[in-house]
Every structure is written in structure tokens, then in C-alpha cells.
């Protein structure tokens, strides 16, 4: 912790880069807490378990001292005039009154219980997220039915899980029998009707509302009464998905992070209509699969993407301004103990995905300062989408 504080406050190039990028992010986290969107514990857990950060933003403000962050933001605001750099009311209050953000609301939280028994899980989709989610449930002992549009795509899911399990076997973390047992829990299907008897469906198909709505109408037709219907959308409305069914009380958001088998976070997103038992069961299931659930409302970006992507976008804009190179920025941020530099992470997430999320956030919040960086649009237009295409901001 002391090391991180030292890096962020250092009077050198790396320190300046870290402050330029982290202070607006901390400001946004203070605002998210101040307006009551999520608890301090959940905001901090979000960034720790969703992005591998060593410390959550509110704990970092406490460690740095809210006054240090307010002073830094005032300096930034004097140069940029960007309203996003004006210290948020919650931050100013903490600085003025010597308040701490952390340590308050974690105690006394009840451990969630499974209210609707779940033994079998359906996963719809065959991409990276769907494959990872199928692995998570199979590894935790659930029977998993995964649904894709072709045998080839189903083979891809099995290939992804097999590769990950083989890696675990090679490292001595899993034995060969356990690997076979886990793979034996996975059943592929090209027909959605195979989901008729599952207790929970998690969909991770294309991030396109019309496509999701068509799926939810179909799940409503196919799934048994009482089944929980979850979407892992990162930016679309859970309520819209719920309203496509005749059972909105059973619909919930379960937003996993990439790579799903590794990142411990699941954002559990409820709407006004979500049944309390569904919410509690899903949070209990997260714990049963080794994940850490955080609760948040049905708003684009939820906790993590709303905090993460504007920071990533700011990193690109800093590079565009000529103030620092990609390498300097990636290095400076890793020196603050983030697991990846922003350009490295953009390439992992996929620049097309990042651009879409950033556009959604601008749509939701309307901040001019969050407009997607020009070079983000450019790499996407050139098909440099990141690791998945062999090149993005970096070349692989
Ligand atoms: N699938 C499965 N397992 C993987 C994996 C993958 N793609 N990549 C790495 N792993 C496993 C490794 O096997 C290893 O497992 P063990 O510890 O059991 O051996 C473990 O993860 C650590 O991997 P490495 O030692 O190879 O690498 P690392 O220490 O650099 O960690 C990382 C890799 C966990 C991905 C780490 O770099 C990290 O936390 N990065 C940040 C990722 C992040 O921020 N994700 C959020 C993106 S935003 C998002 O997902 C939301 C959205 O809506 C777009």
C-alpha cells in the first residue's frame, strides 16, 4: 500500500502520468458512492476482483488522503476546465471533514442463501465469456448445458475449457481424473430446447439488444417455471430483457469479467421487478463458484466498466496529446501495481468492445470528456481489435 501511495505521489514522469489518469477515476468512484449507486465495499471489491487492482478506489483515496486528491483534481481542472476534473462533493466533504470512505458498511452483511435450488445451469453463447462461464460452473460441480449455433462453435467451447484444464493439470493444480469429471459435466446442444429443465440460464451472446430480446422471448417459451434467467450483458438494460418475458421477477444481470475463470467478480444487477429470492440465490451461487458478488442497479456500465473504461480512454487521449508514449503510460500504471497497463488491457478486452462500451457510457451519462478517443476509433476502423486479431495498440 505504501509503495502504491509513493508511486502515485512521486515527483517524476511516472507519478505525473499516474495522477493524470487515476485522479479522475478516483473522483468518479467518490461520486458513485456519494450518489448511493453502490456501497463503498462493493465499489472497492469491484475494481479489486474485476480488474485485479491491488486496492479499490475509495480505499486508495483514504490512503492518499482525500485532500491530496482534491488538490490534484483542482490543479487538473485549472488546466483542462473539464467538469469531470472538478472535485466531487463527496470527495470535498471527506477532505474538509477528515472522513474516511472505507471500513463503514461491510460489517453485518448477511451471507446470502440459495432460495431456489440450482443443480443444472444453461449457458447460451460460444464466445470467450460463454466458454469461461461454462467452465466456472462445471468446475464448481454443476451440470452445464451450453447452447451454440453449430457443432463447430460447440467444439470451440469444449476446446477452450479443455485447454484451461490442461494448463491446470500441467501445473499440478488439478489431476487428470478431476479434469475428466469436469468435462463430463458439460453437454453441448445446438437447440435451445435443451434448456427446458435447467434451473439457471446465463446468456453471453452478442451484445445487441434486439438479439438479446429475441433470446429472452425464447427462454420464456422454453424454460421451466421458476428457472432464473440471467444475462451477462455489460451495457444493455436488464429491464429490457426482463420485459421481453412474462416473468420479469426471474430475470437478473450476472456480469462476469474477462477471463471469467480467473477474475473473481460478478456484478449482480437487479431491476425493480427482480424477485428478492432470485437476487439472493444468484449471490449465493457466485460464492458457491468461488466468485465475489457485488450488487448494483440497472445502469449502463454498472460499477466496474463505468470506472474502468473512461480511465482507459483517458490513457489513449494522454498518448494522443504527446505528453507520454504508450510504453511510458503502460509502465507508469503497472508501477502503481495495476496488473496490466491500459493499452495492454484494451488489447485484451478488444478495442471494438471498448469503443462500444465507451459510446454507451457517453449515451448514459452525457459527459463530453468521455467521448471516445480518436485513435480508439481508428484502430477499430482498421480492424486492429487487439489480441484476438493479432494487433491492436500493440502487435502480438
Ligand atoms: N483463461 C483462463 N485462465 C487464465 C487465462 C485465461 N484467458 N489467462 C490467465 N489464466 C490463468 C492462468 O492459468 C493462471 O492460473 P493459475 O494461477 O491457476 O496458474 C492465472 O490465470 C494467472 O495467469 P498468469 O500467471 O499467466 O498471468 P498474470 O499473473 O499476468 O494474470 C490476469 C493474468 C489474471 C489476466 C491479470 O493480468 C489481470 O488481472 N488482468 C486484468 C484483467 C482485467 O482487468 N479484466 C477486466 C476487463 S473488463 C471486463 O471484462 C468487463 C467487460 O464488460 C468488457
Image: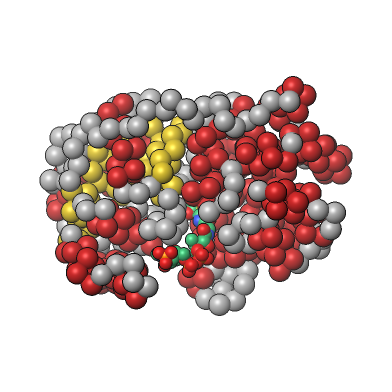
Residue 363 drawn above or below residue 138: above
Residue 383 drawn above or below residue 249: below
Query: Which residue is at a point 70% across and 49% down the rendered structure image?
Result: 2
Query: Which residue is at a point 31% across and 38% down the rendered structure image?
Result: 284
For the C terminus, the image quarter is bottom right
Query: Which residue is at a point 22% across and 62% down the rendered structure image?
Result: 182
Q: Is residue 115 left or right of residue 352?
A: left
* Colour mapping used in the image: secondary structure
Decide which of 368, 64 is in the foreground and name it.
64
Query: Which residue is at a point 29% across and 45% down the rendered structure image?
Result: 288
Decide which of 322, 45 is in the foreground and name it.
45
Q: Quadrant of residue 144?
A: bottom left
Q: Is residue 124 visible?
A: no
Q: Is residue 254 visible?
A: yes
Q: Position of residue 354 (x, y in %)?
A: 55, 55
Q: How many marks?
A: 0
Q: Position of residue 236 (x, y in %)?
A: 44, 43
Q: Position of residue 283 (x, y in %)?
A: 34, 37
Decide which of 340, 155 is in the foreground and name it.
340
Q: Position of residue 4 (x, y in %)?
A: 69, 51
Residue 386 drawn above or below residue 204: below
Decide which of 146, 261 is in the foreground and name it.
261
Amino acid at each position: 500500500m505504501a509503495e502504491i501511495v509513493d508511486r502515485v505521489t512521486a515527483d517524476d514522469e511516472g507519478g505525473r502520468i499516474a495522477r493524470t489518469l487515476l485522479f479522475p477515476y478516483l473522483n468518479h468512484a467518490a461520486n458513485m458512492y456519494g450518489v448511493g449507486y453502490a456501497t463503498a465495499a462493493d465499489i472497492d471489491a469491484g475494481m479489486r476482483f474485476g480488474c485485479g487492482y491491488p486496492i479499490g478506489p475509495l480505499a486508495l483515496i483514504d490512503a492518499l488522503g482525500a485532500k491530496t486528491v482534491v488538490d490534484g483534481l483542482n490543479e487538473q481542472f485549472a488546466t483542462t476546465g473539464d467538469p469531470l476534473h472538478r472535485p466531487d462533493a463527496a470527495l470535498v466533504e471527506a477532505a474538509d471533514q477528515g472522513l474516511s470512505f472505507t471500513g463503514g458498511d461491510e460489517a453485518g452483511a448477511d451471507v446470502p442463501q440459495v432460495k431456489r435450488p440450482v443443480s443444472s445451469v444453461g449457458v447460451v453463447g460460444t464466445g470467450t465469456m460463454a466458454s469461461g462461464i461454462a467452465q466456472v460452473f462445471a468446475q464448481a460441480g454443476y451440470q452445464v448445458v451450453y447452447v451454440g449455433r453449430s457443432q463447430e462453435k460447440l467444439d470451440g467451447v469444449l476446446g477452450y475449457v479443455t485447454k484451461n484444464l490442461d494448463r491446470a493439470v500441467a501445473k499440478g493444480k488439478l489431476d487428470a481424473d478431476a479434469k475428466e469429471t469436469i468435462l463430463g459435466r458439460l453437454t453441448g446442444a445446438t437447440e435451445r430446447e435443451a434448456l427446458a429443465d435447467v434451473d439457471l440460464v446465463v446468456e453471453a451472446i452478442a451484445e445487441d439488444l434486439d438479439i438479446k430480446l429475441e433470446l429472452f422471448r425464447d427462454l420464456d417459451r422454453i424454460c421451466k417455471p421458476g428457472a432464473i434467467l440471467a444475462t451477462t450483458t455489460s451495457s444493455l438494460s436488464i429491464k429490457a430483457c426482463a420485459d421481453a418475458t412474462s416473468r420479469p421477477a426471474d430475470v437478473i444481470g450476472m456480469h462476469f469479467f474477462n477471463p471469467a475463470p480467473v477474475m473473481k467478480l460478478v456484478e449482480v444487477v437487479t431491476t425493480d421487478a427482480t424477485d428478492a429470492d432470485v437476487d439472493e440465490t444468484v449471490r449465493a451461487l457466485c460464492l458457491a463458484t468461488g466468485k465475489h458478488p457485488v450488487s448494483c442497479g440497472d445502469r449502463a456500465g454498472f460499477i466496474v466498466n463505468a470506472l474502468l473504461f473512461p480511465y482507459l480512454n483517458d490513457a489513449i487521449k494522454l498518448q494522443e496529446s504527446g505528453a507520454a508514449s504508450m510504453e511510458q503510460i503502460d509502465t507508469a500504471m503497472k508501477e502503481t501495481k495495476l496488473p496490466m497497463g491500459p493499452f495492454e488491457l484494451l488489447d485484451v478486452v478488444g478495442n471494438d468492445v471498448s469503443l462500444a462500451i465507451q459510446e454507451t457510457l457517453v449515451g448514459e451519462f452525457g459527459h463530453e470528456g468521455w467521448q471516445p478517443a480518436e485513435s480508439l476509433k481508428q484502430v477499430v476502423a482498421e480492424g486492429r481489435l487487439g489480441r484476438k486479431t493479432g494487433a491492436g495498440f500493440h502487435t502480438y
